[in-house]
Amino acid sequence: MIAECLAETDLMLVLDGSKSVTKPNFDLVKEWVKRLAEGMHIGHGHIQIGVVQYSYLYPNRPWRRQRFIKTEIGLGQYMTKARFDAAIDRIRYQGYQTYTAHALNKTLNIDFQSKNNRYPQAKRALILMTDGNANDAEELPPVVELANSMGVVMYAVGVGEYNITQLQLITGNRSNHVFELSNFDDLHVIISDLQRQIRTVCDCDLDGSVSMECDACTQKCDCLENVVGRRCDSCANGFYGISSGGGCKVCECNKYGSTNTSSCDGLNGRCDCRSLVAGKQCDQCAQGYFGFPECRQCDCNGFSISCDDTTGVCTGCSGGRIGDHCESCEVGHFWDEGNGQCIPCNCNNNINASDPTSCEAISGRCLKCLHHTTGNNCEACLPYYYGDATTRTCTKCVCNMEGVDKSECEGENCNCGSEGMCKCLPNVEGDTCDRCVTNTFGLGDPNGCKECECNFDGTIENTTCNAISGQCVCKKGYNGTSCDDCAKGFDRGDSGDNLCVALASLVNERIDREPTPPADDEGLISNASPTTIPTTTPKPVATTKPKMTKAAKKTQPRRINPGWSPCASCGGGRYSAPTWPSYCHGWTCRRRWPHHAQLPSPHRCYAGSWTCRASVRSHYGRYDKHSFASTHYGYWNAPSYYRGYHHHPSVHHRRRSNFYPQPVRYSLYRR
């Protein structure tokens, strides 16, 4: 009876051989596999068993070169219990990591596709045994989808510190397919339950079956209401849509619109509709028709393919049409016979598009131009405006009424052309005719500006008269509007050139022209005393010595100390204060006394100031300048730069010892 009721099944066992399992526990797993196969009666040929052990994954290697995702026993390789048990005993424990998703992927794609597979005549089942968390858990979802598409029913056995979420994902949340154990010694507890489920392989549909149990021999599942099929995976005729726990729903096809009210699509419930009828339940007219159930064609004059299901009013009119039947042009459009459609009125954006009277519906002529425009297309500016109507920049003309030509005006409004330039009276200029041209005056005269009447002799050269009064710019001694009169203290000369001359010069000129009176015997001048003309002696011009600039001072020769002068900073070691005294002569520095008995110092004297140059680089080269207190002259900043002849009596340096910075003070000699 057992052999008769056993389902034809291809079974693969996927065993975790990671380090956490340990070898003693893996030996228990092998004994469990042998006892599990014993109840499957593999000798009858109904069940074929294969075994895969897994742990580590070599990246970028094909399956045939993966040493630790290995097919230990091929599907159906051994069909006797003795040979199967011997092959199990030969399996060697691996002991590495846990690449569960890759092991399942390899089993599905390689082992279930081997030459001994019997699908679809035989059912497919897979048992996973693991004790930990998968290293490749993110790849489990696509593997589960692959198993479902291949018809593989998966079971999971978790031992010890397993991840229950991963086991539920692998089994498709079938609670009776997950077995949880605290240690490997308890593996024998689940053998009979696994054998019973594998022998029957109940792959009942989760949504259509009452439970996951099925008949041991026929594998027929217990279906919900209105659900049929061995696996309870389809709806009965007249029903559709298997829902979890609710069975199938009855078809709701409209009796006027459907061809068969008792039948519909088993998945989505769509009914079979008659002509001109649409909808899932065949309860409305097809597109372009209205008035269910008669369904008449929409009358939209060819400008729409849809209308209201009840009233037949057209919707979505194209070509700028409006109306219940798309019979007229929309606001701001007119009918173009040539194109056979409504086109926008060409009014250069100078109309109110929402005003139905702004554009003539037949000819497209613009009727209510805005923005100071006019014309059939609102393409020009109104009179007395200038600018570009197409860019809505028409602007009121502004002309000066005193200088504009009144023939171009009507009251206070004047034309100014397309550029905004008014037409001016003679001798008037400016865009608005607001000023006289050069050498003219009198803006406001009806005849335009008059030319200046300046006297050539009395007017300053290269000047013009006042544009309002006509007053010329007179030379000294001239006055009057035209500079043709002599000023007070001046009069016309006798030379005939009609020039204004100062009265005093005129008197002297006339005296010079009078004859000299004769002298008497004593050589005396006659009693007639001539006018005395005073004379003045020019004052001497004072000269000042130009002030010398700083740059010029630097180029002056500097005095060099003539003899040996004591100074500071020449002596001393690298980490000590300068040795006293040191001496300078010119640029040469000698350390200590007597100077003639010592070798020259590598330091240089500051010859211009007769002192040694403070050389931080020489004495304190290990530290940057921020390690030292600043001085009044900052010698270390630019040692070769000339600093002047007068010096502060003391300079403060700060040096470092090996442990603490200590202040050092020494003085520079005055000259």
Image: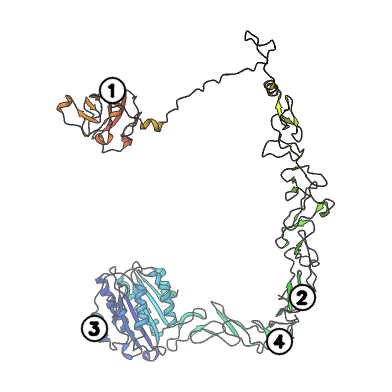
Q: Nearer the viewer, mark 4 or mark 1?
A: 1
Q: Is residue 307 left or right of residue 178?
A: right
Q: Nearer the viewer, mark 4 or mark 3?
A: 4
Residue, far front = 521
Describe the element under mark 3 as helix, strand or loop. Answer: helix
Q: Give the distance between the C-alpha atoms of the residues marked 2 and 3, in whole angstroms.
A: 94 Å
Badge 2 amino acid: Trp
> Which residue carries the number 2 mark?
335
Q: Give the distance between the C-alpha atoms of the residues marked 4 and 1, in whole angstroms.
A: 126 Å
Q: Is residue 366 left or right of residue 2?
A: right
* Residue depicted at x 33% and y 34%: 641
* Residue depicted at x 34% and y 66%: 161
> Which residue carries the number 3 mark?
86
Describe the element under mark 1 as helix, strand or loop. Answer: loop
> Which residue carries the number 1 mark?
669
Circle 4/circle 2 CB separation < 8 Å:
no
Label 2 CA crowd tier, 10 Å (few <14, some 14–19, many 20+)? many
Q: Is residue 439 above or below residue 49?
A: above
Query: In terms of sequence position, does the residue under pointer 4 or pointer 2 come before the other?
Result: 4
The answer to which of 598 and 417 lies nearer the viewer is 417
Badge 1 amino acid: Tyr
What is the quadrant of residue 276 in the picture? Answer: bottom right
Query: In terms of sequence position, does the residue under pointer 1 or pointer 2 come before the other?
Result: 2
Badge 3 amino acid: Ala
> Which residue carries the number 4 mark?
256
* Numbered badge on residue 510: none
Label 3 CA crowd tier, 10 Å (few <14, some 14–19, many 20+)? few
Horizontal and vertical percent for residue 644?
Answer: 35, 28
Q: Is residue 444 above or below residue 352?
A: above
